[in-house]
Amino acid sequence: MSNRGRKVSNNIHYDSPMKTTDRDYAEARRSRYPNTYRETPPDERSRKDWDHYTALTAESNAKDNEYFALRLQEEKQFAAYGRRDRQSVAKEKSFYTEHRAGLFPEQHERLVEPSRQRHEAMMSTANARDRYLVDHPYGYYDYPQRKRHEGLRDGAYEDTLAARLDFDKHYKYAGDPASSKRDKYGRRQPREY
């Protein structure tokens, strides 16, 4: 049977969440870390891994803020474009809003690299969070703290997917510097055309 017309799933698969009880988790943690079970993280290796993904999270948040500040600036410039002569640019703006994700090709070009950096930083953070969960299954003070971290890991992968979609959108609609083709408003054609 052919799979034509079916949508390919973009879901990210990773380790399933730990299934245990608070009491079992506490006993397993106490047996694994008898002298330091009250500390989070409980040993030097888990402390090092914890510090690593915490640093990656800070870097990811900085890239995210940088990207959104630049994107907001570009969206404001797009909205302000042609305010003096609204009728002559109304069709042009509606074309780019409808067919180019609401920005001009040169604006997408400026957002390609920041969106790529944002995606890579978020992917590193999500992978580090997942690796910490796998390498240190009892690295949290208690089971609710572990469950919360599983949720943060899931959210990090969802944010990574959203960042990838933003990057793909900007790359797709950025003007192609290798092409001499222009759209009907004199701007470079996107790579897809």
Image (cartoon, rainbow, N blue to C red):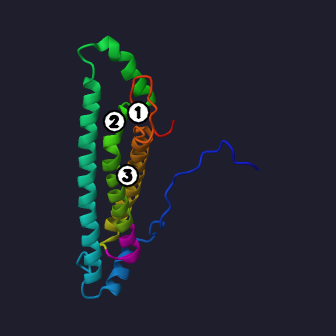
Q: Earlier in the sequence, mark 2 or mark 3?
A: 2
Label 1 environment density (alpha carbons within 10 Å; few <14, some 14–19, many ≥20): many
User: Where does residue 13 sit, x and y in percent of width and height?
Assistant: 50, 61
Looking at the rendered structure, the kind of residue marked 1 is: Arg
> 89 or 139: which is nearer to us?
89
Let me know if residue 104 is in the magenta part. no
> Label 2: which residue?
106
Label 3 environment density (alpha carbons within 10 Å; few <14, some 14–19, many ≥20): some
**Which label was assigned to residue 159?**
3
Is residue 53 rendered to the left or right of residue 154?
left
Q: Which residue is painted at 24% across and 48% down in the image?
A: 65
> 112 or 48: which is nearer to us?
112
As helix, strand or loop, the secondary structure at mark 3 comes to: helix
In this rendering, the label closer to the viewer, 2 or 3: 2
Q: Earlier in the sequence, mark 2 or mark 1?
A: 2
Q: Are marks 1 and 3 in contact (CB under 8 Å)?
A: no
Q: Are marks 2 and 3 in contact (CB under 8 Å)?
A: no
Looking at the rendered structure, the kind of residue marked 3 is: Asp
- In space, the residues marked 1 and 3 are separated at their CA atoms by 30 Å
Q: Earlier in the sequence, mark 1 or mark 3?
A: 3
User: Where does residue 63 sit, x and y in percent of width and height?
Assistant: 26, 53
